[in-house]
Image (cartoon, coloured by chain):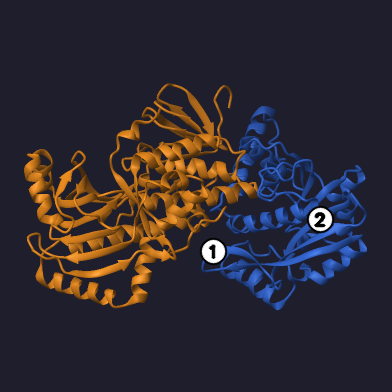
Amino acid sequence: MERTAGEPRGQADQREIAKFARMAEDWWNPEGKLRPLHRLNPIRLAYVRDMICERFGRDPAGRTPYEGLRILDVGCGGGLVSEPVKRLGAEVVGIDPTEETIAAARIHAAETGCAIDYRVATTDDLVAAGETFDVVLALEVVEHVPDVAAFVASCAALTRPGGLAVFATINRTPKAYALAIVAAEQILRWLPRGTHDYRKLVRPEELGGHLGRAGYQVVDVSGIVYDPFRDLWKRSPDIDVNYMVAARKGGSA
Amino acid sequence: MGDREAPEVVVAGGGSAGLCLGLALKRFLPDLAVEVIDARPSGAASSDERSSAIAAAARRMLERLGVWDVLADDAQPILSMEVTDSRTGDATRPVFLTFDGNVAEGEPFAHMVGNAPLLEALRAEAEAAGVKTTWSDGVAGFSPEPGAVRIDLSSGKRRSARLLVAADGVRSRLRSLAGIKTVEWSYPQMALVCTVGHERPHHGVAVEHFLPAGPFAILPLKGNRSSLVWTERKEDAERLLNGDEFVFLVELERRFGHRLGRIELESRRQGYPLGLILARDFVKPRLALLGDAAHGIHPIAGQGLNLGFRDVAALAETLVDAARLGLDIGGIDVLRRYERWRRYDTWQMGVTTDILNRLFSNDIMPVRAFRDFGLGLVDRMPQLKRMFIGEAAGLGGDLPKLLAGHAI
């Protein structure tokens, strides 16, 4: 965190807090820079909910189907997934490697009254601390990690036996290159240029291989497609571009 | 939040739309804390003698919500509908268009229901479902705060909620406080509303005479009674309302015709100025407009109350879906779904009724010839007729689940 030399600490802190509050506003502005993520969010949350309810025998029409579950949100950002998951009754830990992002997420959670345990940490840090979870969520994360196999292995170490992991990411296909990189970044400017590196995208079968080796069994693979006429995302069998995977950790809960 | 009571949803306005929304939310999210607040004392609406046409879609929702059972016995089904186009003094009124009023086997496209029993049934069912109701205390002001909306009541009490729903009528105070602009124009017409008794049975037939001053609708009620919605030029309407009852009856008979025998007035004469008012925005952060607060339309097609019920079904589904995903139900991204869902439909209805009114409220020969040609065409095209019936029954468009009679 930057601080001008000689400046009284209190003032610098005030300025820092104001900066994080602005960042929180950016994260949570549905018409702002992160509009695409906001549009995508309901369908991701619905997928997560349906998978969790199926695995743990919960009622998806209830208000607190996650009661009693401990859930980790990896790469939580401003808390777009952590807060809804918290409201559905879970105990939530949200981790992100960036200190500013976690500070922004904390400010927003305080405003909305969501008691979430946000930490500046990586999955490796949590593994070292011996933490475990009923559900590990890694939405829009695997396409950004340097070593997918190692990342999936650390997720597995954090998932309790019989627990669930849910991933959302982008396929490595020509269609994904055209839509997720050329269209989204260069033509529509939905995302800053360079958000996604084509070489780092992961195919479902590759992810499935890592999951199997880490002790998971894949229970579902679903595509998420964009309907430009209704400006809505919906679930689809088409996994060429965006897709989600739910996997169950071996052993019994 | 401190000492403030903190329901999650506060509905300002205990009319049929507000109470119905509260009930729908409680039915499908029993844990959601919902409060309906109204400045009027409880039961103030029991003096409303008017009746309304409940379209099939709205009836399906009321049935799903457990309200229809109470109302069914006193509801008069509209079994068919006749449309005529004539001059006031014409001895006979040629029928240009008849509709058989069923949308499905044994399901009439609309029922006539008394406003007072409808409201009472909604209130009783909402309270039984756990909606908190507060009467004789209105919402005086509100301000959105991060994560909540602070609501100030006239009594000085306060609430803190996730969402405030403005169901406070066509002159919505909350709409103006929110700075939401409206598009409005008034018609040089007034609707005269009354109930008449008649000698002979109506057989469930609704009649709409397009007279030069505007539509004159005869809507069947239980027994040998009918509800009239009589549109008249403003000056004429005021004369008829305030003048001698004998004059009123004579003018009424001229328009009503003699088919149902002798008629007599069974209620007060009431007059309502006609206008079209559409809110430019239906939502703001932590605020949603519902029913007449979002739109007041010309009653030519009898769709005002039904539009309100469509709002209820769409907003309830939007909020229930969002709550079940854990989303913030007062968040603008959630509320925009409701707005997208309802705004187009509302504008379409507003514009259609306006065009209908302009087309039919005149006596210009070429216009009459054109509209009669149109009505005659529609009458000979069963598919088009079915579409009109479907629209009148409220079954067209992107239908919320409740309006199809399904659970959310």
Q: Residue at x 19, y 51 (%)?
A: B199
Q: Which mark is residue B309?
A: none
In which quarter of the view is residue A99 placed?
top right
C-alpha span from label 2 to label 1: 28 Å
Circle 1 residue: A231
> Is B199 on the left-hand or right-hand side of A252?
left
- Spot occupied by residue B196 in the image (x, y as percentages of width and height): 20, 46
SS of the residue at dot 2? strand
Q: Residue at x 53, y 53 (%)?
A: A31
| Chain ID of residue with mark 1 | A
Q: Which mark is residue A165?
A: 2
- Spot occupied by residue B167 in the image (x, y as percentages of width and height): 40, 41
Write down the colour of chain A. Answer: blue
Specify whether disc 2 shares its chain with disc 1. Answer: yes
Q: Residues within 10 Å of mark 2 (few under 14, many from 20)?
A: many
Camera-side residue of B274 and A131: B274
Camera-side residue of B263 and B340: B263
Q: Amino acid at mark 1?
A: Asp
- Spot occupied by residue B30 in the image (x, y as percentages of width and height): 60, 40
> Is A110 on the left-hand or right-hand side of A200?
left
> Is B389 on the left-hand or right-hand side of B340?
left
Camera-side residue of B333 and B39: B39
Q: Residues within 10 Å of mark 1 (few under 14, many from 20)?
A: few
- Looking at the image, is B193 positioned above or below residue A208? above
Which chain does the orange colour mark? Answer: B
